[in-house]
Amino acid sequence: MKSIQAAVTLIALTCGFELSRVESAWGYAPKVQIEQLKLIPIQTSLNLLEEAAKKQEQEDYPGAIADYTEFLDTHPIGGAAPVKHRVEAYSNRGFSKAMLDDLRGAIEDFDRAIELAPNSADAYNARGNVNAMAGNPAQSIRDFNRAISCNRNFADAYYNRAIGRHDLGDRSGAKVDFDRAAKLFQQQQDLGGYQQAREWIIKLR
């Protein structure tokens, strides 16, 4: 399987990020009462997310988790920060937790990201990767199915589902998905993904 980094990556703070194109939707209600929270200005919060992203890129996962947690604790739903920033924080914190082998915590964070952005193909794909890492191939395939239903051209999700199907002994289903992934990777000029998919297709002949 392509690494979780390839499927999740950092969810950037700008609208031009590669893998997470979230939609705003209300969902998770924080347990902490809003009046108990110390709210911080929106620009300060964006700086906090940027610092968290830098730490994550530098593989300082504990530091990144601390910053994402601070952002989430100080920005309840209905506050100044857009919902998409909370989705970014949950998703990226989930990634960092997965890198530290806290797979249950990672899945919980992706669950919350999906509650906020129920049509986010990227969040489903990321949770599918973590479920695969946790040894839950059937659940991971369900997540990849949801990712594909949200984005029919999501090459990574087809590739990841193919791996899951192969692990469950469904060679024909895996080959169909690898074929689809290879075509999409080629169309999207992802040479690395295309080559990996082609290697699997050759292997399954």
Image (tube, rainbow, N blue to C red):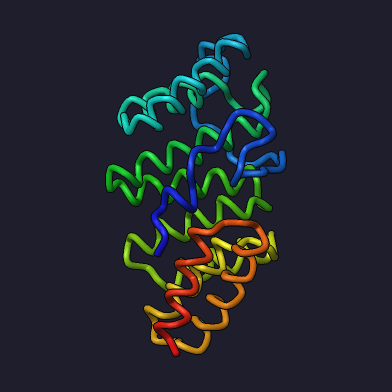
- What is the tally of numbered marks visible in this picture? 0
**Between residues 121 and 182, which one lies in front from this camera angle?**
182
Q: Quadrant of the N terminus?
A: bottom left
Q: Quadrant of the C terminus?
A: bottom left
Report whether 161 appears left or right of 2: right
Residue at 42% from the left image edge and 48% from the top image edge: 5
Q: Is residue 129 above or below residue 99?
A: below
Residue 108: x and y in percent read: 44, 47
Residue at 43% from the left image edge and 25% from the top image edge: 54
Residue 9: x and y in percent read: 48, 43
Report whether 155 appears left or right of 165: right
Q: Is residue 34 above or below residue 85?
A: above
Residue at 28% from the left image edge and 42% from the top image edge: 100
Q: Residue extending furthest left?
A: 101
Residue 193: x and y in percent read: 50, 61
Residue at 61% from the left image edge and 11% from the top image edge: 43
Q: What is the quadrant of residue 145 in the picture?
A: bottom right
**Between residues 27 and 178, which one lies in front from this camera angle?**
178
**Between residues 193 and 86, which one lies in front from this camera angle?**
193
